[in-house]
Amino acid sequence: MSSVLISAVVFALFFIAAALVGRRMAGRGRPYGMVTLSIHFALFVLVAAGAAATFYKLRLLNAGATLTTISLAVVGATLLANLVVGITMTLARGERRQLSRVHRTSTILMMLSIGASIAFMAAGL
């Protein structure tokens, strides 16, 4: 179970980096710089790969960690929501406050789910 926990912590660190870059993008407003947007997307890909790797390792161990599996499934759903909303925000013309709010809310939910999955893994649930 320790390799799964290490994988989850590394993917959480990538998430923190992506959130910080996203926060910086939100503070600057549109138009987003191409370099910052590329970095944010690259970090998103690393977060998605980390989530998939963690979920895959957990399934391979067959640890029966139901709460961890549920929280990682929530992470997957919020990743998908962030991808769709992020692409829509990038391509949309004008200011879209609702899209920004959905993107921020799903990111907060993802943060809580990542924290819960790490806590559940550490507790063996």
Image: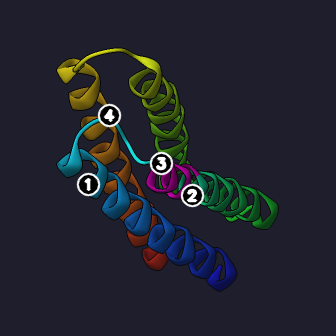
Foreground: 9 or 27? 27
Q: Is residue 12 visible?
A: yes
**Which mark sits nearer the N-terminus, 4 or 3?**
3
Q: Earlier in the sequence, mark 1 or mark 4?
A: 1
If you read the primary sequence from the N terminus, does the residue marked by circle 3 or circle 1 appear first? 1
Q: Point out the frontmost of discs 1 and 4.
A: 1
Depth check, front residue: 94 or 85:
94
Residue, far top: 93
Q: Is residue 67 magenta?
A: no
Say if mark 3 contacts mark 2, CB within 8 Å: no
Of mark 1 and mark 2, the one earlier in the sequence is 1
Mark 3 nearby-residue class (10 Å; few <14, some 14–19, many ≥20): some
**Distance from label 1 to label 4 (Cα)?**
11 Å
- Of badges 3 and 1, nearer the viewer stands 3
Q: Which residue is mark 2?
A: 47
- Alpha carbons under labels 4 and 2: distance apart: 15 Å
| Residue position for label 3 | 37
Q: Nearer the viewer, mark 1 or mark 2?
A: 1
Q: Residues within 10 Å of mark 1 (few under 14, many from 20)?
A: few
Left/right of residue 105 with respect to residue 11 in the rendered view: left
